[in-house]
Image: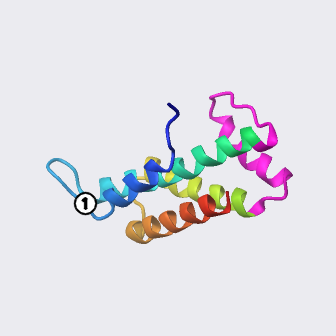
């Protein structure tokens, strides 16, 4: 049975504001931003494959290729949402300091909801 990428958005919401034994709220929020991105990315990739003939290579270049695919179809709204989500995910995955992390997470959840709603 195929994975339902929307579950990652539910997981992101679950992680919001949580801390636990051995991890901080910051770590949880960073992970949540990443899950929000991959919820939108996974659903968008499935959609593009079905509707536009997008072909996955399973490589890092697929992320940019997917956004380009949506732009070519006149879906700048989806491409733009994926752009901002990817930028936030990269910040959370690679930067030592992420200013306004909790606000970024709120924006990421809203943006992922927006992308999913447009698909």
Instruction: Work out whether residue 101 can be spotted.
Output: yes
The residue at which mark 1 appears reads as 18
Left or right: 113, with 31 as reference point: right
Q: Residue visible at 62% across and 63% down?
A: 117
Residue furthest left as drawn: 21
Which residues fall within the magenta stretch?
Answer: 51-76
CA neighbours of label 1 inside 10 A, class few (<14), some (14 to 19), many (20+): some
Left or right: 90, with 117 as reference point: left
Task: Check the image and tell me how it is coloured.
Answer: rainbow
Image location of residue 8, percent across then percent down = 44, 49
Q: Residue visible at 49% across and 37% down?
A: 3
Which residue is more in the foreground, 86 or 48?
48
Left or right: 62, with 91 as reference point: right
Work out whether 47 lies above or below 119.
above
Confirm whether the magenta stretch covers residue 70. yes
Q: Residue visible at 52% across and 68% down?
A: 110
Work out whether 106 lies above or below 13.
below
Image location of residue 95, percent across then percent down = 44, 52
């Amino acid at each position: 049975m195929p994975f339902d990428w929307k579950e990652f958005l539910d997981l992101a919401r679950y992680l919001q504001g949580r801390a636990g034994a051995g991890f901080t709220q910051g770590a949880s929020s960073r992970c949540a931003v990443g899950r929000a991105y991959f919820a939108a990315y996974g659903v968008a990739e499935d959609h593009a494959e079905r509707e536009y003939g997008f072909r996955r290579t399973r490589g890092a270049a697929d992320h940019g290729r997917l956004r380009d695919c949506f732009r070519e179809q006149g879906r700048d709204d989806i491409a733009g949402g994926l752009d901002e989500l990817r930028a936030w995910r990269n910040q959370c995955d690679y930067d030592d300091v992420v200013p306004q992390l909790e606000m970024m997470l709120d924006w990421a959840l809203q943006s992922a909801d927006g992308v999913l709603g447009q698909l």
